[in-house]
Structures are given as structure tokens and as C-alpha cells.
């Protein structure tokens, strides 16, 4: 069987996980032949794992080497758009780690290149493989239970210590990471939010910078959105709560979905809520209904599922888990949230003013400072936190 020869750029927490997936035989239609990292110790570790690997210190050299047909990009956020563009222009298929980038202006330029390319471009939205979220999307998109009325997601189980933030000079800085909990921990949830419920029309937010930690970016966020049909939503997240909560509620005209603790429940009503509001004779009348557990297929293939779908798309044209160009959607929400917070909670109407956002971001980059008290930590495998 012909295999796709691929490389990994960035052998840190996520990149090392991708290497282990290959080493454990979980990526059968691809052959890992090269890695790239600016840190010699990471290249040395890679060689210890797979002695036959070609190792590069510069991504351009890898892209031009002729060794690879595809690449996984697992570098810091700002690097994603330029590396994706360069790889595509070199005729290489690309699977990019989340987020798509830091600001939508750069991601839009990346998407324009991708749309003109005949190469596959995918993004590592591995949470889309989770049967819980796939079923929620299926139910919402079916229209069987009417339109969305309200969405609430409280995702506060991202607890982090100061030592976590001190593990890299670039971490939790505007110049190095481009944001905090929204850009680091929450890209998957922001993607799922819009994937299941659609894009909002308006955004307001409060993003508290360094509320719980000695960092210059946000570690406590409340986002309020309005949808085109008048529905509303909230998204609450932080790295300063313990124990945290991960609860997603979607209220429809004739049902309520609740995803929490690895379970999906649905309260199915016998009629639309509005029919009861307008037609009931008693002031305290309520629609009848019952809790149900939607049938799931149990599959949750995560990173391996995304990577294998990437290979199958290249080889046989099978569907991707997430098209790379879709990465701009969740990022648009976080950019709008930042912009709203920077302007004292001003309502931001989508699409955002991308030039304005970039100018405001550059102001923060200009005063950003890398940490000087860095104590690097090696994580066994960060994938379990996503």
C-alpha cells in the first residue's frame, strides 16, 4: 500500500504526541520521515524515538527537501499562517494544529492561498470527532426541534498554576502567544460552539487580563453573543477556577440539550415553548416532556481520527474532519471578544474590522515582554487536556 510521506514541524507538547501516535502504529496510511524544530534537544529526542528520521532546524529547508508529501504544523500560534502558506506553495498537503492563527487578517490571507491550491488543507479540530458533539450538531442542524433560543457554555476546568505560565518565555504574552485562555485552551470549544450553533451576529465581552495569574493576557472571560434569529448565548471560561465545570446547554424551541460529565441528555417537549407562552390558559402552565439520552455511536477518535481522515482525503478524496479554512470562524469570535473588551464592552458586529483588530493587537505586542523567570517543563503528553 502506498503511504503518504510526511513531516512534523514543531516537536513540543503537541508535535511529540503526533510522533508517538505514528510510532505506536496508529497512522497506518502515512510514513513519518522528517521532523523540524529549532531546539536541538527536541530533534535529539525525535531521533531516539525513530532513528531513521531526517531532522531539520528550519522549516523552509524541510518544505524544499522533496522528502515529504504532507506536513503537520505544531508550532506557536503566530507561525501557523506563514508556514501553511509556504508549505502549500511548495506543493505540500497541510494539517495545521489549532488555532488557525492569532488574528483573522493573517488567517484570511492563508485561506485565500489554500483555496487556490490543489493540495489538502485541514485543521486539527479533534473535538469534532467526539460523538457527544457530533450528536448535538446533528440534532440542532436537523431542525426537528426548531430553532436555537439560547446557548450557554461554561468551560472552567482549565485550571493552571503560575508555574505553567512560567514554563516558556513566550507563553501568555501578546508577542509570543497572542492571547491567553481563548487562544490557548479554548479554540476547540469556540469552534464547536459555532459548528453546532452557527456564527453569532454580535459579540460583547469582558476579558480580564492577569486576574488570577501574573500574566499579560486574559485568564478570565465572559462572552455574550446574539444570533441572527435573535437567540442569545454566553461563553464563560477561566484558568483560575477549581474545581471547574464543563457544561454546554442548547435550548431549542421544543427541546433542551445538556452535555456534561461525558454524557448527553435531551429534554424533549410535547410542543413548542412559544405555543405555551402565548396559548396556555394558566399563568404557571408548562409544556410536558421527558429526559432522554440520544443514541451515540461511541466513537471519539481525537487526533488520530483527524490525521487518518487527512490521509484518506489525500489518497481517496474522503471527507476531512475539518477543512483548514474553517479555522477562521472560532478565531473570529475570540478576536471579536478581545476587541469588545478592549473597547470597554462595546458591541462588535460581525464580520469584525480586521485592520482595526490587527492595529490594536500590535499596540499590545509593542509593550509585550517575554518572561525572564522561565523554568521549562516537559509534559508526558498534553493531548489529554484537550
Image (spheres, rainbow, N blue to C red):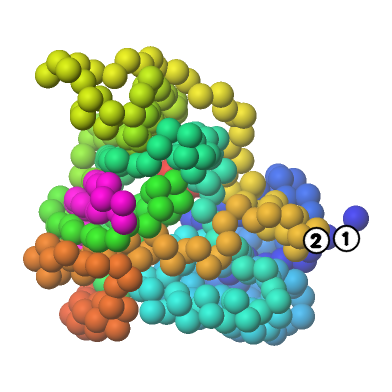
Q: Residue at x 68, y 83 (%)?
A: 90
Q: Quadrant of residue 258?
A: top left
Mark 2, residue position: 315
Locate residue 322, reporting x and y percent: 57, 56
For label 2, the SS is: helix
Locate residue 360, reporting x and y percent: 21, 79
Q: Is residue 210 visible?
A: no
Q: Residue at x 62, y 29 (%)?
A: 297
Q: CA distance from mark 1 to mark 2?
A: 9 Å
Where does the magenta region start and end? 216-235
Q: Residue at x 75, y 71 (%)?
A: 69
Mark 1, residue position: 2
Above-or-below relation of 336 to 222: below
Q: Is residue 302 left or right of residue 161?
A: right
267 or 194: nearer the viewer: 267
- Find out whether the residues at labels 1 and 2 contact each other: C-beta distance under 8 Å: yes
For label 1, the SS is: loop
Amino acid at each position: 500500500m502506498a503511504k503518504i510521506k510526511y513531516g512534523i514541524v514543531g516537536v513540543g507538547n503537541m508535535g511529540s504526541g503526533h510522533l508517538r501516535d505514528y510510532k505506536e502504529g496508529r497512522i497506518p496510511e502515512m510514513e513519518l520521515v522528517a521532523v523540524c524544530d529549532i531546539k536541538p534537544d527536541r530533534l535529539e529526542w525525535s531521533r531516539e524515538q525513530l532513528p531513521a528520521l531526517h531532522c531539520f532546524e528550519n522549516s523552509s529547508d524541510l518544505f524544499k527537501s522533496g522528502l515529504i508529501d504532507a506536513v503537520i504544523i505544531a508550532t506557536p500560534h503566530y507561525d501557523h499562517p506563514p508556514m501553511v502558506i509556504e508549505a502549500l506553495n511548495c506543493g505540500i498537503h497541510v494539517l495545521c494544529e489549532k488555532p488557525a492563527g492569532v488574528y483573522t487578517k493573517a488567517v484570511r490571507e492563508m485561506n485565500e492561498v489554500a483555496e487556490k491550491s490543489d493540495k489538502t488543507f485541514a485543521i486539527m479540530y479533534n473535538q469534532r470527532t467526539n460523538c457527544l458533539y457530533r450528536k448535538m450538531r446533528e440534532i440542532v442542524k436537523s431542525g426537528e426541534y426548531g430553532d436555537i433560543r439560547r446557548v450557554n457554555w461554561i468551560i472552567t476546568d482549565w485550571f493552571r498554576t503560575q508555574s505553567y505560565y512560567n514554563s516558556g518565555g513566550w507563553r501568555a504574552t501578546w508577542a509570543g502567544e497572542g492571547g491567553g485562555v481563548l487562544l490557548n485552551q479554548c479554540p476547540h470549544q469556540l469552534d464547536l460552539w459555532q459548528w453546532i450553533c452557527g456564527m453569532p451576529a454580535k459579540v460583547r465581552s469582558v476579558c480580564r487580563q492577569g486576574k488570577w495569574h501574573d500574566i499579560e493576557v486574559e485568564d478570565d472571560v465572559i462572552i455574550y453573543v446574539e444570533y441572527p434569529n435573535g437567540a442569545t448565548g454566553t461563553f464563560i471560561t477561566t484558568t483560575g477556577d477549581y474545581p471547574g465545570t464543563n457544561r454546554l446547554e442548547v435550548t431549542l424551541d421544543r427541546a433542551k440539550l445538556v452535555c456534561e460529565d461525558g454524557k448527553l441528555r435531551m429534554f424533549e417537549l410535547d410542543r413548542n415553548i412559544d405555543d405555551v407562552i402565548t396559548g396556555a390558559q394558566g399563568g404557571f402552565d408548562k409544556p410536558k416532556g421527558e429526559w432522554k439520552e440520544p443514541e451515540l455511536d461511541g466513537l471519539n477518535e481525537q487526533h488520530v481520527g483527524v490525521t487518518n481522515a487527512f490521509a484518506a482525503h489525500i489518497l481517496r478524496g474522503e471527507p476531512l474532519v475539518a477543512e483548514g479554512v474553517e479555522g477562521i470562524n472560532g478565531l473570529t469570535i475570540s478576536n471579536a471578544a478581545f476587541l469588545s473588551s478592549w473597547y470597554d464592552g462595546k458591541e462588535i458586529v460581525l464580520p469584525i474590522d480586521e485592520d482595526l483588530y490587527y492595529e490594536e493587537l500590535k499596540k499590545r505586542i509593542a509593550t509585550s515582554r517575554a518572561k525572564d523567570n522561565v523554568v521549562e517543563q516537559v509534559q508526558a503528553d498534553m493531548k489529554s487536556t484537550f
